[in-house]
């Protein structure tokens, strides 16, 4: 019986290796493009009770170095000082437009409705999205524009790590973000886009309208970013932007991070069948691989798990990261094992429990 678990674990690790091939290929084929066009951009941000972080976000936006851009802030039912902060910044960001929402219509998830109002009021073809608690680099729009192939690109997937903070929770958050970016950006580069992060994403208004916006997944409170990409993305029209980063503030407690990931993973229930199968195979292979690898270690067969983790660590080096490579390898065995358990718990909870956008 023990031998069966060991063989199953080794087989599972091999399956995960096979599933990693298109990801690795996507990273190997990616090369930083030369700018070909500089279209006007509209930055769209939804703000719901963001008085603590909104000023930092808008301060970073005010430093953007680009020829033609504007920003739309959707103040979504805020009851704190968010509205006053937005109007204070309007004096410094001349191109800032404000949309206020006082009530969300029945049947609409709040953030998807707020984003839709921002998009409907957008006058440019290209739109860039981030969150009200994010910090964008001054060359953000310039870098997005560099990824646009004229008459072809409709969607750009960006990288968005979290700010580095002390403590082990932050190390786990950083690792999870690294793994997620490795997968969705690598597959996006390989012509197989399946998700994106709303903190750093850009797409055309034509693409959004052609897909009828968020209407196909209004029953899901989350997924204004990954579900939209899963629904509308075509490999031939998608580019990735691994760098520069749009930073966001990490969760500071295990409970808050669990709730956040629970909400994120719940969106997977609405993915297209092919991606449900792919991600399910990945998660199951990872679980069985760890079980079989640990049993193998106790039986004196040391090589399967360390070799698999080393290969995974080398693969993750493809992704630009705020951490140095040594940090990745030192904590890799612990963070990878805990992340596997955490993802299973958050995914199951996300499917079973009711979510809400805070």
Image (cartoon, grey):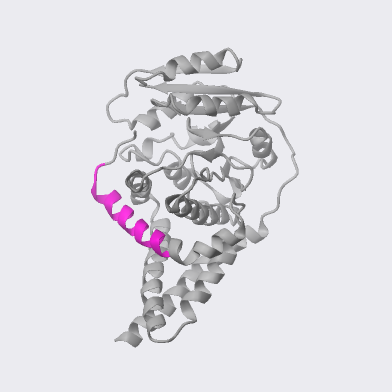
Left or right position of 88 against 168: right
Q: How many marks?
A: 0
Q: Residue at x 40, y 66 (%)?
A: 281
Q: Is residue 334 above or below residue 265?
A: below
Q: Which segment did they paint magenta?
A: 337-354
Quarter of the figure with residue 273: bottom left
Q: Main secondary structure of the magenta part?
A: helix
Residue 20 position in % (x across, y down): 52, 66
Q: Is residue 236 above or below residue 132?
A: below
Check residue 345 for magenta coloring: yes
User: Which is more toward the observer, 248 or 327?
Assistant: 327
Residue 203 position in % (x across, y down): 56, 37
Q: Residue at x 45, y 18 (%)?
A: 99
User: Which is more toward the observer, 323 or 146?
Assistant: 323
Quarter of the figure with residue 93: top right
Quarter of the figure with residue 11: bottom left
């Amino acid at each position: 019986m023990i031998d069966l678990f060991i063989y199953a674990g080794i087989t599972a690790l091999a399956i995960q290796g096979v599933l990693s091939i298109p990801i690795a290929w996507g990273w190997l084929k990616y090369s930083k493009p030369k700018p070909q066009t500089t279209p006007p951009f509209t930055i769209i941000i939804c703000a719901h009770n963001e008085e603590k972080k909104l000023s930092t976000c808008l301060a970073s936006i005010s430093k953007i170095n680009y020829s033609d851009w504007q920003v739309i802030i959707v103040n979504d039912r805020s009851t704190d000082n968010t509205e006053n902060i937005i109007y204070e910044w309007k004096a410094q960001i001349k191109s800032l437009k404000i949309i206020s929402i006082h009530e969300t219509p029945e049947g609409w998830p709040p953030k998807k409705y707020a984003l839709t109002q921002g998009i409907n009021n957008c006058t440019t073809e290209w739109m860039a999205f981030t969150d009200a608690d994010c910090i964008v680099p001054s060359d953000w729009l310039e870098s997005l524009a560099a990824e646009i192939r004229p008459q072809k690109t409709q969607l750009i997937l960006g990288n968005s790590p979290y700010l580095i903070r002390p403590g082990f929770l932050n190390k786990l958050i950083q690792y999870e973000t690294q793994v997620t970016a490795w997968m969705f950006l690598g597959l996006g580069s390989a012509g197989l886009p399946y998700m994106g992060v709303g903190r750093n994403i850009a797409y055309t208004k034509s693409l959004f309208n052609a897909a009828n916006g968020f209407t196909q997944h209004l029953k899901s409170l989350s997924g204004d970013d990954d579900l939209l990409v899963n629904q509308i993305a075509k490999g031939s029209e998608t580019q990735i932007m691994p760098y520069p980063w749009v930073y966001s503030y990490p969760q500071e407690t295990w409970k808050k991070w669990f709730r956040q990931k629970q909400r994120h993973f719940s969106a997977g229930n609405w993915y297209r069948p092919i991606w449900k199968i792919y991600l399910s195979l990945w998660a199951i292979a990872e679980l069985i691989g760890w079980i079989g690898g640990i049993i193998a270690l106790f039986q004196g067969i040391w090589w399967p798990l360390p070799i698999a983790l080393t290969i995974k660590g080398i693969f993750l080096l493809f992704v630009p990261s705020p951490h140095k490579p040594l940090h990745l390898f030192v904590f890799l065995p612990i963070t990878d094992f805990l992340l596997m358990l955490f993802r299973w718990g958050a995914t199951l909870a996300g499917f079973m429990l009711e979510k809400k956008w805070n």
